[in-house]
Amino acid sequence: MEILIREDETFKRAHQKYAAFTRDDEMVEAYESRMKWIRDYNTKVFLAKKEGRKEGEFIGKIQLLQQILKKPISDEDELLKQNINELEVLLQNLQKELNF
């Protein structure tokens, strides 16, 4: 690394900027804050996708059980208006009906 810095002007400038950056506490704090925001954002997106998949799974099962039980099949858009807990209760109720 030291050889590259001594022999290559691009690496030398990059190393100087990096050294200046790491000495600036405000810049380091801003960088760390930005990285935390990115991690938090990615976690929220991951969890939202996971919940969306779970909702889709519940909706599919609900509609299938309604079909098996010869009940009117709920519109997907109407089911999407319900939260995950409401969907789970509806699914459990349909499963109970099927077991009787």
Image: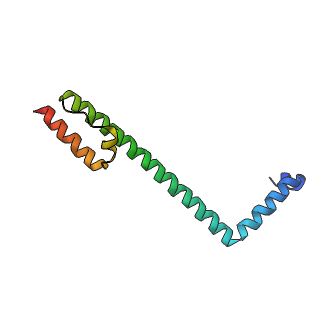
What residue lies at 31% left-to-right and 43% top-to-bottom? 78
Q: Is residue 98 left or right of residue 12?
A: left
Count all numbered tags in the image, as a single digit.
0
| Quadrant assignment, res 54 | top left
Where 23 sits versus 43, above or below? Answer: below
Q: Is residue 89 left or right of residue 99?
A: right
Where 25 sits versus 87, above or below? Answer: below
Colouring mode (rainbow / by chain / secondary structure / one colour): rainbow
| Quadrant assignment, res 76 | top left
Residue 97, percent from left and from top: 14, 35
Residue 92, percent from left and from top: 20, 41
Residue 30, percent from left and from top: 63, 67
Q: Residue furthest bottom?
A: 25
Residue 46, percent from left and from top: 46, 48
| Quadrant assignment, res 75 | top left
Query: Which residue is nearer to you in this view: 25 or 7?
Result: 25
What residue lies at 26% left-to-right and 30% top-to-bottom? 64
What residue lies at 9% left-to-right and 33% top-to-bottom? 100
What residue lies at 79% left-to-right and 59% top-to-bottom? 15
